[in-house]
Image (cartoon, helix red, strand yellow):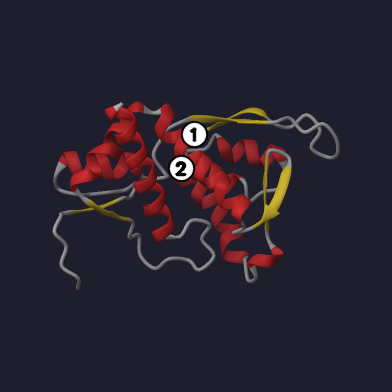
Amino acid sequence: MPKHDRPGLNIRGNSDHPDPEQRRIERILSNLAPTPFTLHVPKVLEGDYRGYGGVMKFSSVESLLQGIKFKEPERQQEIFTMKGIDALRAGRVITKSITDKSNHFIWFGGHSAQYGSLWHQLVIQSAQVAKFVQNPDAAQALMETVRYRIYHDVGPENPNTSLREPDYIQMLLWIRDSLLATRKQ
């Protein structure tokens, strides 16, 4: 096991860390955390999704991650408003059904993209940024992680996850560094 110079924080929505402050940080940084945010998506002007878009609301990052796996706008909206854990359970059916990522798509703002594509990752990154910009408590908690080594260990990772642990942590570190740089200005 590698030796680390800083204590670790395992980002999990169900953290049971004995230190209440570390538990608070681990939980609020989780994609399951109730950290509502909005994204502005251009309205679709034609086709099956005509009129879809505008200001879209999400209960958590997990709600977005799971909702975009569904093609039907009504089902998406339902999942976008769910608690994080409920959204995770709803989307797990699709995640487990994936055998070839090239044959699966995500739908967001009336547009589709291949599951795992750059566009898919940009949607996820946009959600992560919006979460921290629109939730000051989450932003503060993320900035406090500068004294910790952060990781996300929830057991064996599904090979079809839309957000791999190293990518998730890298995203959080980039957002944290951006928040800290902005704070210094």
Cα distance in 3D space between marks 1 and 2: 7 Å
* Foreground residue among 50 and 4: 4
Q: Are marks 1 and 2 in contact (CB under 8 Å)?
A: yes
Q: Position of residue 169 (x, y in %)?
A: 37, 53
Q: Quadrant of residue 27?
A: top left
Point out the residue furthest to the bottom here.
1
- In the picture, the quarter occupied by the C terminus is top left
Q: Quadrant of the N terminus?
A: bottom left
In the rendered image, which residue does mark 2 sit on?
84
Secondary structure of the residue carrying tag 2 is helix
Q: Where residue 48 appears, x then y in whole percent? A: 83, 40
Which residue is located at x 43 percent, y 27 percent?
Answer: 134
Query: Residue at the right extreme?
Result: 47
- For residue 142, the mark is none
Residue 39 appears in which quarter of the rendering?
Answer: top right
Could you tell whether 11 is left or right of 42 in the image? left
**Sequence-wise first label, 1 or 2:** 1
Category of crowding for the residue at label 2, using alpha-carbon neighbours closer than 10 angstroms: few (below 14), some (14–19), many (at least 20): many
Three-letter residue code for mark 1: Ser
Residue 170: image location, x then y, percent? 39, 53
Q: Residue furthest front?
A: 185
22 is higher (above) or lower (below) than 92: above
Residue 100 as seen in the image, left or right of residue 129: right
Q: Amino acid at mark 2?
A: Gly
Q: Which of the pair 158/143 is nearer the observer? A: 143
Residue at the image position 72 percent from the left and 49 percent from the top: 112
For mark 1, give the secondary structure: loop
> Height in image: 113 above or below 34?
below
Question: Residue at (32%, 35%) from the top-left corner?
Answer: 181
Between 176 and 157, the one nearer to me in the picture:
176
Residue shown at the point (86%, 39%) measured from the top left: 47
Q: Which residue is mark 1?
A: 59
